[in-house]
Amino acid sequence: MSGTSPVTSGPGGHGDAFAVFRPRRGRLVALSGAALSVALFSLIAVLLPGPGSGGGWRAGDRVFFAACGVGIAAMLWRYATIRAVPTRTSLTIRNLILTREIPWDAIISIQFSGGDPWVTLDLDDTDNIAVMAIQKADGDWGRREASRLAALIQALGIGRPADGSGGPAGPSDPAAGPSGPIAT
């Protein structure tokens, strides 16, 4: 990074290394889908023929259709809010269902290769956790964000050797881990 610390610089050597990780494409699709879901199901609820116009749809049926749209929108909104928040002491990962705070020294390696749609962290308790906020669907942006996360792990992971020969994220290449470089 030509003299800049991964703790003070972001992707490309500028910006904030502690910026929140968020997906781009998935977030846009989820928010658009949520708005479309509410609009479409509400429209269906309004246009269903009631008993007065030759149909058998009652008020409860209409409310059910509108509620389905709101329920789908709520699930899509939750997907749109996935993120990973780095601090100097830990990484807080909010995935679709659970939120978990991981201390930097508990992260053994980072993987972003093969068929996985998002980054996976290997932890010292033999657990693996997905970081859904960094996704392959985001292309180059996703790869840069994975490299930024690898640099943070390397810089802030306490379990690395004192001689600087490597650490939780591996050798001097911030995109490399014990299982190899971050690849897509």
Image: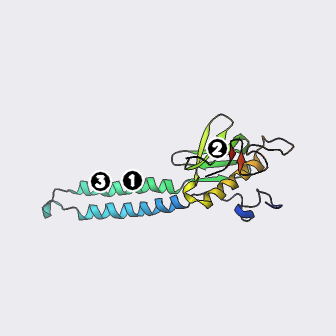
Nearer to the camera, 61 or 155: 155
Q: Amino acid at mark 3?
A: Phe
Q: CA distance from mark 3 to mark 1?
A: 10 Å
Determine the residue located farthest toward the top in the rendered image. 125
Q: Amino acid at mark 2?
A: Leu
Residue position marked by numbered label 2 in the rendering:
121
- Specify which label sits upstream in the sequence, 3 or 1: 3
Residue position marked by numbered label 1 in the rendering:
71
Against 115, is 19 above or below? Answer: below
Q: Which one is closest to the eye, mark 3 or mark 2? A: 2
Callout 3 touching callout 2 (CB < 8 Å): no
Residue position marked by numbered label 3 in the rendering:
64
Residue 46 at what x, y percent from top left? 26, 64
Q: CA distance from mark 1 to mark 2?
A: 31 Å
- Specify which label sits upstream in the sequence, 3 or 2: 3
Against 177, is 138 above or below? Answer: below
User: Considering the numbered disc 1 on the image, is that residue within a helix, a strand or a loop?
Assistant: helix
Direction from residue 96 to residue 41 in the image, left or right = left
Residue 136 at what x, y percent from top left? 57, 54
Q: Amino acid at mark 1?
A: Gly
Could you tell me which residue is drawn at 66 percent across and 50 percent down? 182
Name the colour scheme: rainbow
Residue 66 at what x, y percent from top left? 32, 58
- Residue 40, quarter of the rendered image: bottom left
Direction from residue 160 to residue 99 in the image, left or right = left
Direction from residue 133 to residue 54 in the image, left or right = left
- Specify which label sits upstream in the sequence, 1 or 2: 1
Nearer to the camera, 140 or 36: 140
